[in-house]
Structures are given as C-alpha cells and as structure tokens.
Amino acid sequence: MKKAQPRVRRLLASAIMMGALSGPAALFPASAAEAPATGAPPNLDLSAPGVGWAGFVAPKEPNYAVARLFNDFAGPASGLGPVTDGPAHPYANNEVAREMRIPPTYRVADLDNASGKNLMPWVREALAKQNELVLRGRNGETREARCWETGVPAFHLNPGVMQIIQTPREVVLFLTGRERHIWLNVPHSANPKPSWYGESVGRYEGDTLVVDTIGFNDKTFVDSYRTPHTDKLHVVERFRLIDGGNTLEVAFTVEDPGAFYQPWSGTRNRHRVMNPNSRPAEFDCSAANDDYFNIGLEPVPTAEKPEF
Amino acid sequence: MKVVGVGAIGVSFALAAYCAASFAADAAPDISGTYWATSYSPKIQVLGGGDPPLNAAGKAAYEKNQAGLKDGSILDKARRVCVPDGVPRVLATPYPFEIFQVPADQVTFLYEMNHQVRVIVMDKPLPKPEALIVDPKYNGHSIGHWEDETLVVESAGFNDVTLLDAGGLPHSDEMTTVERIRKIGNQLEDIITIHDPEMYAKDWQARFVYDERNDVRLEDYACNDKHRDLSGVKGVQVR
C-alpha cells in the first residue's frame, strides 16, 4: 500500500493539473448526444486496473468504532446527520457482533434525537411502524438484502468493494451488482424520468468530483433504517481522495422538502484495495432469497409475467 | 504462380496483423460506446438458417424446457426475478448496452436489462477447469484478445440454469463459446459459436447486430418496473 502512495500522488497532481486545464470546458456543457467520445478522462482517474474501493476493511484488533461503520454512514462534523439508533435500542451489526462477541440486532431508529425530529410526520410514522415490526422480529433485513435497488445515498452503504469506470462521458460506479451512472459536464435534463438512482450529473471542482442527483422515484429508502423520501429528493455527493489516496471519501448532503425539515449530511469512506482480479462481477441476489423461515421478509423484486 | 502470389499476400497480411498486435496496448480498436439492437427474436436464429443441431439429449432437454415454460413448472428466472440472461441469450437483448474499454486490461459489457455486467479479461488465459467448475456464472467467465479489428472472446464456466433463448433452447454447463465482435461502420456485429457436445451434434453459430447509439443513456432497471419504450425494436411483443 505504502509503495503505491507516491504514484497516487503523482496521478492526483496530474489530475489537478488536468482539472485546471479542462476547467473552462465545464462552462460549455455538452448535451448527452454530444458527449465527447475520445480524450483522457478528466481529473481523478478512479478506474485504474486492479483498484477497488472497499466499504469496510477489518481492523487487526477488534474496534467498535470501526466495526460500527461496517454498513452505516458516519455523521457530519457538525450539523444534522442521518437517522441513527438510540440508547433504547443500540444497534449491533454483524461485524460489531463478530468483533465484540455480542448478538447482532436489527436496526431501530431513534425518533427522538435531532435527526429523528427532523423527519416530517409521515416519515416519522413510517419509521415508527418499521420500528414496531423490527421489535416484533420482522422485516429487519435491509432493502438491499432483499435484492431491491438501493437508491441514493443508500447505495454507498454496502460494505463490499466498489469498482469505478471513468470515461470522458461518464463515471460508472459498480457495487455488488448495482450500477450508477454519473454523466459528466452536462446539465440536468428538464424533466428527468423518475428512477431508482435518479439522474446524476457530475463535474470536477479541482480534485473533487461533485455529483448532483435529482429525478428519483419514491420507492427507495435513504438509509437502512428504511427512512422513506419523496420524488423531491436531491442529493449532492462530493467524492475525493484523502489519506494519501488510500481513502475515497464520499461526503453527501440530502434534502427533500417533502420528507425532511432541514437538509442533513453524512459521510461514507471507502478504502483502496489492490487486487488484479478486482473487477465488476455478475450478481445473483434473487435466485436464493425466498422467505424460507416465514419471518415477514419483504419479497424480492419479481415480475408477474415475462416482460416480452 | 497465382497461388504463390496469394500466399505472399497472406504472409504480408499476417505480418501486418502481427505488427498491429504488438502495438495492441497502444492501439486497441475502439468499440466502446452504447449500442441497441433494432430487432429481437425470441427464438435464436442460426447463422446460415435451419434449426440448432440438437442431439438426442438436447432434443429431450428442449422438449422438457418448452413444456415446463408453458405449464409453469420451469420458471424463466431471467424474466421473472431478473437474474442474468446467460450467453447467448443476453446478446439478443432488446435493451441498450454499453461497452467500456477502461481500464485497458478489460472490456466491460454493461447491459441495461437486468443490469448485467460481463467483464472480458484481456490477454489472459481462462481460469483452469477446476477453478471454473466451483465458480459457475450465468454469463460464464470470459477472456479476450484482438485479431486485427475483431475482439475475440472465449467463454466457459457457465452455470446450467439459463436458457439459450426465450423458447427454452438448452445447454449444459460444459458449453463453451467463442464470439467475434467487431465494428462495421456504425454497427456492432457479434458472431457467436456455440460448442456444447452434450446437447448439440455439432458447433453452430448465431449473429447479432446492433446500432451504435451514443445518444442513448443506459437507464436503471428493476424487475417488474416500468421500463423504457421498446417500440423501436422489431419483434418485441410487450406483454
């Protein structure tokens, strides 16, 4: 890892240079149809061979604080953060359970802390219902575990390895069978078709990839507590390398005037892992995910009949 | 004399190909972009016409699949729970797909339908049979290399739960395929050779052609969702 650092710094330095040179291009955004087909990828080249970004790397010694972020957002340094667990029902994810040798739990949202009070009444009600289900031992699995598209920012919660492909036209994020497209240096469409991951447009601000996403459907949750949102959801993510290029920081802000009184923020860091065989892979979630034990699991996405 | 002349031309072509190959790292042909078929056939069309050369075991498996799909005892998982289609059925997709050639050591096919990813690992051998047998994939394991302007893709290590087409054409987990993929003007051609002696009396081929459509963006796809308009793809009958 250490040996790789100088190279990463050089890449970063050249990336920043390129950013400075290509900056004015952002002033003249091309339409999707006119996306450049050739030329070097702008700025951060996150798609180097063998590079993956792990949501979690197990520490050598048990470490509660690290394990706690196995599949969760970190809160912001200041201001409102994501919905969390509370003192009444501390959450122990599988990694916490493994490292601390305690039983794992499902998530119960704290509706009385600042983030809980930031939820509009219908969102609080939805979460209260979900809490009640979980406390009865039902529906505790995440949306992702039930093979649904996760949406944004919940996409980032998966602790697995994310691969990135970057071209002049777009950045594609691959994470355990899910993909997101970030269209570079183009404005939002006038009326984006509502979708699971919304319409993401990205631009570089120096060494930071800034991604603005709107045009969501209202079928996803913003987190693993199953916090719902409306189609007014708007997420801004800032991707940048920190820690000498070994950590990809994704800092995001969520606003939804139909669900949250105030915008809130969070962070999800991913760790650089080198593996020559680290490549996007096919994903088979729904083939073996029936509710075998009849514990009220949400059904996997299923078409009643073949589409064509 | 004429024969010698043709031979000499052949040698010079081979030399040119060799030279091109030796610079492949810098000058791999560019097939990246977004593509979309203009027609769809639920029954795979054999190149040269006729029916796939099923052997006795293949015929029995085909009849069983057809009957099972009809009476519901066999679930078309690729269409009902949206698992990957498998090769070659994924090549018949009436949805757009995108090809990436970065990083340089892989060619990535990303399909909108069932958001399938096929990564072709370039200039490496296939994993050994004992490695493939414990890690079967819907779309198999694929390696590739360039022969002039053609991407040659070899695949093996398929699971045995996919169908070769919507009608239930069978295959075994011993199937291997070779695809020759190239740009012809603004189209992409993929000619696939199916080798599966357990089900077929001899190798056979199918040909798929797609229009380059860099004006199209891949969309999110989830099972049972409302998807994009396929009215521009001949042969699709949305149910």
Image (cartoon, helix red, strand yellow):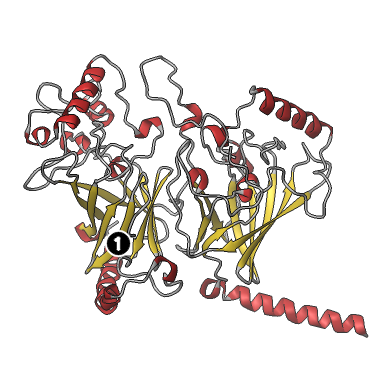
Q: Residue at x 49, y 63 (%)?
A: B101
Subunit of label 1? A
> Which residue is disc 1 drawn over?
A202
Q: Nearer the viewer, residue A30 or B145?
A: A30
Query: Along the horizontal axis of the image, is B58 left or right of B111?
Result: right
Q: Please, what secondary structure does the residue beneath circle 1 have?
A: strand
Q: Is residue A211 above or below residue B130?
A: below
Q: Where residue B129 sits in the image (x, y, percent)?
A: 63, 42
Query: Along the horizontal axis of the image, is A16 left or right of A280?
Result: left
Q: Is residue A96 above or below residue A261?
A: above
Q: Residue at x 62, y 50 (%)?
A: B91
The answer to which image quadrant residue B161 occupies is top right
Q: Where residue A196 sits in the image (x, y, percent)?
A: 36, 44
In the rendered image, the residue lying farthest to the right is: B1
Q: Is residue A170 visible?
A: yes
Q: Nearer the viewer, residue A297 or B126?
A: A297
